[in-house]
Amino acid sequence: MYRNDEMMKKLDEFLLDVQKPSRYIGGESGSVFKDKEDVDVRFAFCFPDTYEIGMSHLGMKILYGLKNRVPNYWCERVFMPLPDMEQKMRERNIPLYALESLDPIKDFDFIGFTIQYELCYTTILEMLDLAGVPVLASERTALTPIIMGGGPCVCNAEPLCDFFDLFAIGEGEEMNLELMRLMEECKKNGSTKAEFLEKAAQIEGIYVPSMYDVSYNEDGTVQKITAKAPAPEQVKKRVIKDFDSVYSPENFVVPFTDIVHNRAVVEVLRGCIRGCRFCQAGFIYRPFREKKTNTVLEQTKTLCENTGYDEVSLSSLSTSDFSDIEGLLETLTAYTSKNRINLSLPSLRVDRFSEKIFEEISAVRKSGLTFAPEAGTQRLRDVINKNIKESDVLSSAKIAFEGGYTSIKLYFMLGLPTETDDDIRGIYALAKAVIDEFYQNPNRKKGKSPSVSISLSTFIPKPFTPFEFEPQASEAEIKRKQKLITEVCIDKKINISWSKYDVSLLEAVLARGDRRVGKAIYLAWKKGCVLDGWDEYFDFDKWKQAFAECGLSMEFYANRQRSYEETAPWSHINMLVSREFFVEENKRAHAGVTTPNCREKCSNCGVIGNIGGECCKNLR
């Protein structure tokens, strides 16, 4: 087992002076250590946030285990240190290092970032700089390290193109290994970086931004995106077709310190049968695929027994859409209840929440219950294609209250397309109806009062959704809506909270931005922006200054209605769902017409034409 003893000595000098030093030492149970002499390709898997958040991410666990199964490849973990640790590192000239070997990541072949959230962009630059790696791709000429990104945000990677060598579009299990094999070959052959990138661009799902030119119209919109040979005109996202047999880790790295989701996690399905028009994940993760019940059971057993966790979470976009969810839960709880393991289902839809499901998930100990009506009236729920009724919400609340719960959380959005003041008032009316449902229960415990928490987030138009054309509501309009809901909410059993508008605005800008936005990201980072997803570090004034100094308008990217004919900055990326489908769905939204889910009827979204054969054949 190799570890950098010199680095360990340097860290020993000051680690007790920083908060939670266990974040920075590695060596946890389940970590993979190798002999450096036997390794041909090294991969630094970077999560651009803190250890506690990154260690909770399932995608990192999957790819970490997958790469390390190959004897001569070594994948190691890297997280963003908090300011106290970063300051100590910079004072002592300690570059960013990987937790397994403690080696500086600048010496690795790949530095790969999983990009889950737009507000991590400046943190990526900070991590590269702390590593001693030039942040601009144009300043990196050697073959290694290759800076790559993956994850949901790279469906529109344009704002990050100045900093990355390549992006992995879609599901990474096959792509990552193909890239590592290519690097192994190129190192042996003495290939240049340009030669590596040309070959990488021919791997399905790999986007090399330097091989595409972008021109703009006089009004600032994108005119044309042109590929340079041999790059494809469109980069088609990668899909794992046999999901039931896809690699699943048999062990997790078990942290020394508590993390956000400190439990075993088993992925039960990918994709979503729903077509909620605001939801990017519901479209970019299509097609819908699920594992067999026995596969989920065996993976649950293996993980719990290897890690010692007493809680397991079933991971998906909508776990309750598993075709035989009640059978799955019955099978799993036979194991989890016997072993005193808590079973958690974080993704439940109210129209699939039954007494049987409630019974199963409450068998060991109760977790919190959260439902997402998203809109306060049926009219607006039809606009967004949520396809749930008020009766579904009240039925779910009734089951929960009868089962002993007294508090429920409801998620809504403000600023949705076509939203009116009556829709805002409807939010309170629905929450009040949930409260009233509690008092309809004749067996409720005396002396107990119900509570409903309303969480309001500002609608953010995202690429690859039917609402990608819509403007985000202005700050003045959102504040007016927030004031309205507080004025009509007179029941003290209902608590209201909402997201900060400036955070939502920046998220919209970065989500729908083009390559020119990269200059503002760079300048914001130079001004000190980092860890923008944390309230205590977020400085919106610096972001505003950065955009102004670059001559860019945030309103242009966030608050502007986009025509169907406009060339989107992401139009050269093929996420399998057709643009024609998004246009048609946008029109249906404005007409208040709903679209059935995939289990009820195929909506011809375009996936079938892109992957060939049947889509979601297990739904038929």
Image (cartoon, rainbow, N blue to C red):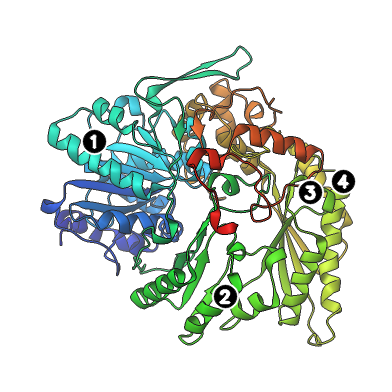
Residue shown at the point (59%, 70%) measured from the top left: 325
The reply to whether discs 1 and 2 touch (Cβ–Cβ < 8 Å) is no
- Of the numbered discs 4 and 3, the one sitting upstream in the chain is 3
Q: Nearer the viewer, residue 193 or 606?
A: 606
The disc at residue 144 is 1
Q: Nearer the viewer, residue 316 or 28?
A: 316
Q: Secondary structure at mark 1?
A: loop
Q: Nearer the viewer, residue 542 or 487?
A: 487
* Looking at the image, residue 570 lies above or below residue 224: below
Q: In the rendered structure, which amino acid carries the disc numbered 1?
A: Thr
Badge 2: residue crowd in 10 Å (few <14, some 14–19, many ≥20)? some
Q: In the rendered structure, which amino acid carries the disc numbered 2?
A: Gly
* Looking at the image, residue 23 lies above or below residue 593: below
**Image coords of residue 80 (percent x, y):** 39, 50
Q: Secondary structure at mark 3?
A: helix
Q: In the rendered structure, which amino acid carries the disc numbered 4?
A: Asp
**Image coords of residue 37 (percent x, y):** 10, 52
Which quarter of the image is occupied by the C terminus?
Answer: bottom right
